[in-house]
Amino acid sequence: MAITRADFPLPDVSDDLVAGYFFGAAAGEVRIPRCSACDRWCWYPEAACPGCGGELVWTATTGRATLFSWAVVWRAFLPAFADIVPFVTALVALEEEPSIRLVTMIIDVSSESLVADMPVEAVFRPLRFPTVPDREVIVPMFRPIEAVS
Ligand SMILES: [Zn+2]
């Protein structure tokens, strides 16, 4: 079914199941649902812990991850993306639970220098599209962690 929201392709931050992710991003944190009973991280968000049925609580992570996979998008697949190509879309594996892989964008680096498993960190940037004027959503994007010598 086609998505017909007027603000598409911005994420639907009014969806109760995912709103905590965007509230976290606006506060500068990558928050992931974690079970208050068994401590399991749960991604994608669900109504209750898939392991034990316990309550899931949006919990801050370090925002650190490793680069699991990526692709450089050269051609806009929707008109809204025409102004941002080329960009790097990626899966990053969270430090807390590497089986959780967030769909994100890699920024502030040349795509030629990306290497599998490289350490990355979250930065919080507005997602904007010219087809949705006057609206933006702060989202976690990721960039390589600078090597510290
Ligand atoms: Zn649980």
Image (cartoon, rainbow, N blue to C red):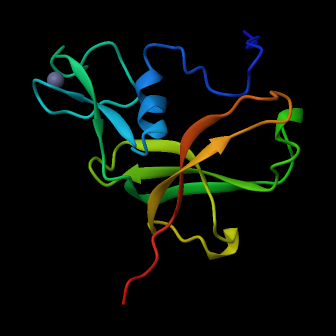
* 12 w.r.t. 124: above or below: above
In which image quadrant can residue 82 be found? top right
* 111 w.r.t. 148: above or below: above
The quadrant in which the N terminus is found is top right
> What x and y, as percent, mark residue 34?
24, 30
Q: Residue 121, can we see it?
A: yes
Q: Residue 78, can we see it?
A: no
53 relative position to 77: left or right:
left
Residue visible at 69% across and 71% down in the picture: 110
135 relative position to 12: left or right:
right
In which image quadrant can residue 127 be found? top right
> What x and y, as percent, mark residue 62?
31, 53
Q: Nearer the viewer, residue 67 or 60?
A: 60
Residue visible at 19% across and 22% down in the picture: 51
* 60 w.r.t. 115: above or below: above
Quadrant location, ligand no. 1: top left
> What x and y, as percent, mark residue 109?
64, 70
79 relative position to 63: left or right:
right
> What x and y, as percent, mark residue 2?
76, 12
Q: Nearer the viewer, residue 48 or 9?
A: 9
Residue projecting furthest to the bottom: 149
Residue visible at 36% across and 90% down in the picture: 149
Residue visible at 34% across and 45% down in the picture: 99
108 relative position to 84: left or right:
left
Looking at the rendered structure, the number of numbered marks drawn on it comes to 0
Residue projecting furthest to the left: 37
Q: Nearer the viewer, residue 134 or 148?
A: 134
